[in-house]
Image (cartoon, grey):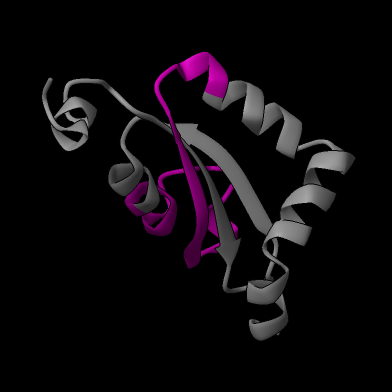
Amino acid sequence: MPPIASLLYTYLVYYLYILQSEKDGNFYTGTTSDLKRRFKEHNSGKNFSTAPRRPFKLIYYEAYLLKTDAEAREKYLKTSMGRRVIRKQLANYLMGSK
C-alpha cells in the first residue's frame, strides 16, 4: 500500500477557507480547488465582493476530497451557529489579533 502522502497527491482537494480583512477585520469564507491562486486573486482585487476590503490574511482552512463537502461546510459556517462555532474554534487567534 502506498504511503498516505502519495495518496493525497492522487486526488483533487477542495478547500474551505476563511480570510480576515486587514482593513476592517471582517471575515470572508469561500471554497476553491486552488487555495494559493484564490488567495492571490482576493489580494489583487480580482474578486468584486472583496476588492474594497483588501489586504487579507488567510486565517483558517480545511481540505475535503469532495467539492460538495467543502460547499456544505461553507454554507454551515455562514449561518449564525456556524459563525459562533468558528469564532470559538479560533478564539485564541482572535484574542491575539485585536
Q: On the rendered image, what quadrant is the N terminus found in? A: top left
Q: Residue at x 53, y 55 (%)?
A: 60
Q: At which x and y percent is residue 84? A: 84, 51
Q: Relative to 33, is 18 above or below? A: below
Left or right for 54, reference 24:
left
> Hey, which quadrant is residue 81 in on the image?
top right
Q: Residue at x 33, y 28 (%)?
A: 13
Instruction: Give yes or no for residue 50 being in the magenta stretch.
Output: yes
Left or right for 1, reference 97:
left
Q: At which x and y percent is residue 39? A: 38, 51
Segment tinted magenta in the rendering:
40-69
Q: Furthest residue to the front?
A: 1
Q: Nearer the viewer, residue 58 or 6?
A: 6
Q: Relative to 54, is 93 above or below? A: below
Q: Nearer the viewer, residue 52 or 14?
A: 14
Q: Nearer the viewer, residue 89 or 75?
A: 89
Q: On the rendered image, what quadrant is the C terminus found in? A: bottom right
Q: Relative to 6, is 22 above or below? A: below
Q: Residue at x 64, y 32 (%)?
A: 74
Instruction: Give yes or no for residue 3 being in the magenta stretch.
Output: no
Q: Residue at x 72, y 80 (%)?
A: 95
- Number of numbered callouts drawn: 0
Q: At which x and y percent is residue 79? A: 83, 36
